[in-house]
Every structure is written in structure tokens, then in C-alpha cells.
Amino acid sequence: MTMENQNGTSAEVQASDRNEVVLRGKLATAPEHRTFGSGASLARLLVTVRLASPARTDVLPVTVWEPDPSLVKAVRGIPVEIVGQVHRRFWTDSEGRHSRVEVVATTVELGEESGG
């Protein structure tokens, strides 16, 4: 199967391969918003997801390209539902080579802020 990537190039993809994640949780912090010289815009989120069984809490990094203004203005504690893909970024700086796993969102739904 051949599919076209976001940058317009085609790539062979296995029909059974899939990279899709759904997160439901709350914003751990207010979004960090950046606009680049090119005009592109992104928001970085930290989403807290609490699971009952097994009992654990994860705080997961999410990147949203061209975020809606309502997301940029969101505050800590607002419920969110994220659909996206897991990506791994690599970079090198003065301290060496690094990598980071994050969710790159394709859709973000904001819930209502709960009182209390």
C-alpha cells in the first residue's frame, strides 16, 4: 500500500501498521505556545492521565501544531481528549544526543472546567 505523507511524498506502508493513541485526562499545566519566524505555531501540553487499575498516574507530553486559540488560553486542570500519533524526536546539543517520545495531536477536545 502506498500512502502520501503530510509533506507530499509517498511511502510504502504495511496495511497492518498503525500508530494512533487516544488520551483522556487533564492539563497538568497551562499550554506553552510558540510562534516561529515562518508563521507556524505550536502548543506544548502536559496531560495528566490517572488510571485506577493498575493504580498509576502518567504525565504525557503532547505537541499540537496550529492550535486553536481556545487551547492556547486553556488553564491547568481542564479535561482534554487527545487523538494523535506517538513520535520520537532526536536532537543534538552541547550536552550530546537526546531523544524524546511525545504525542503529536491530530485532534484536541477541551472539556468544561470543573468547579472546586
Image (tube, helix red, strand yellow):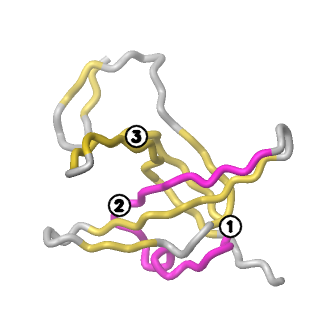
In space, the residues marked 3 and 2 are separated at their CA atoms by: 13 Å
Name the residue beneath numbered marker 2: 65
**Mark 2 element type:** strand
Left or right of 47? Residue 2 is left
Q: Which mark is residue 23?
A: none
What residue is drawn where x is 45% and y is 77%?
72
Q: Position of residue 62 (x, y in %)?
A: 48, 55
Rounded to the nearest angstrom, the CA distance separating label 2 from label 1 is: 19 Å
Q: Looking at the figure, which quarter contains the N terminus? A: top left
User: Tag 2: Cα neighbours inside 10 Å, few (<14), some, or many (≥20)?
Assistant: some
User: Which numbered disc flags the more N-terminal residue, 3 or 2?
Assistant: 2
As displayed, is residue 66 above or below residue 99? below
The answer for how far apart the CA atoms under marks 1 and 3 are is 23 Å
Q: Secondary structure at mark 1?
A: strand
Q: Residue 24 falls in which quadrant of the image? A: bottom right
Provide the residue span drawn in magenta.
56-79
Question: What residue is shown with label 3?
Answer: 87
N-terminal label among 2 and 1: 2
Residues marked 3 and 2 touching at CB (< 8 Å): no
Coordinates of residue 36 in the picture (x, y in percent): 21, 70
Per the image, the residue denoted by label 1 is 79
Q: Which of the pair 103/11 is nearer the observer?
A: 103
